[in-house]
Amino acid sequence: MLKVSENFTVGLLAPDKKSRLSSCQGHGHKLCVRFNSARTSKISDIQYCVDLVKKYDYENYLGTLLLPKNAQRAAFALRAFNVELAQVQDAVSENKIGLMRMQFWRDTVAKIIQGFPPQAPVATELAGACNYYKLSRRWLERMLESRAAQIDKDFFKSMKTIEEYAEHVNSSLYYLLLECLGIKNVHADHAASHLGKAQGIVTAIRATPFHASKRRVYLPIDILSKYRVSHEDIIRGNSSQHVKDAVFDIASIAHQHLEKARSLKSSLPPESNLVFLNASICDHYLKSLQKVDFNVFDGKLQHKNALLAYHMYANKLRKKF
């Protein structure tokens, strides 16, 4: 049975005084923070993050369990941070409230950088991960700012803008996970960039029925316009050939990014494939979408992949993704 490691690594729960730096040096890219070891020894903080990811991001929860034990706790902290940011837009009824919540997370990250993280489970665990692995500040801030910028928008202007958003949010998270495994490699970063874009595009397609129910459309306008598909067509759940053709184009770009990431496999350092195991999520959805002739509103697409954990574990054993 898979079990989450309670420690980032041996010795982290009692860092020496020299490691407790009160601030980042200059404008360096690495986070150096104070770390309240008494708080991090509380299993409730760890479990809170694990439960949050399990409830709202189950597929990536499964992938995180397949990471090396000494990186799981940090990975769950990062995943929990991402869940918190992702929930803001859907959890509020007014953009103003959403922007206020994003400001809270800006302040939280700033306090982590200054060495005084708020006494809250995700903040405490994130601070611990940043402290031990010296995670790059710019990736956390890029995730946060990109999510915040999207709060008052209910569309993506073009395929390029959705790719940029996916790079800033999803790829940044992959870069941080690679750092947790001590991987610094240009090919791994390249794979992370493409996989992040694939995941972001697939997420936009998968969530189309949900967003349509809230009168939001996150499929890129330029491709919808190319096939003369209006926002109202998507909101009404239109499954005409024009809509299917537009979805096919968007899915094809996601598939290209996925295949590009996989094509780099032979150049990747050992263990980096573990960070990319959730490529199976994108792969399964794109194949399922093809089976229903790219009808994004087909109910079959809402079924969970019961074999996902098996596929990811098999890929782990085969050292592939």
Image (cartoon, rainbow, N blue to C red):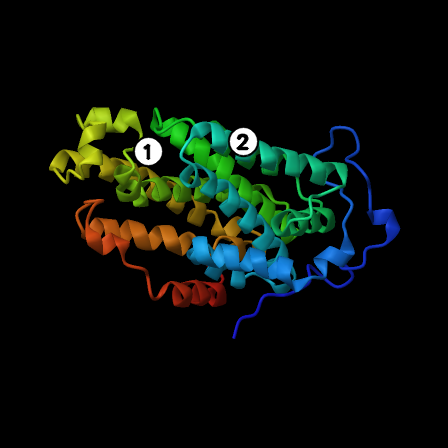
Mark 1 or mark 2, earlier in chain: 2
Residue 117: give x, y in percent of width and height: 71, 43
Instruction: Please give the residue where the numbered disc 1 appears in the rendered image.
Output: 218
Left or right relative to 265: residue 233: left
Closer to the camera in the image, 126 or 69: 126
Tell me the element at label 1.
loop
Q: What separation in Å lies between label 1 and label 2 (alpha carbons)?
A: 23 Å
Given the image, on which type of amino acid does mark 1 rest? Answer: Tyr
Closer to the camera in the image, 29 or 113: 113
Q: Residues within 10 Å of mark 2 (few under 14, many from 20)?
A: few
Point out which mark residue 100 bears: 2
Q: Give the farthest residue toward the left.
A: 240
Residue 226: give x, y in percent of width and height: 21, 25
The residue sitting at 64% across, 46% down in the picture is 123
Left or right relative to 230: residue 90: right
114 lies above or below 178 = above
Left or right relative to 274: residue 40: right
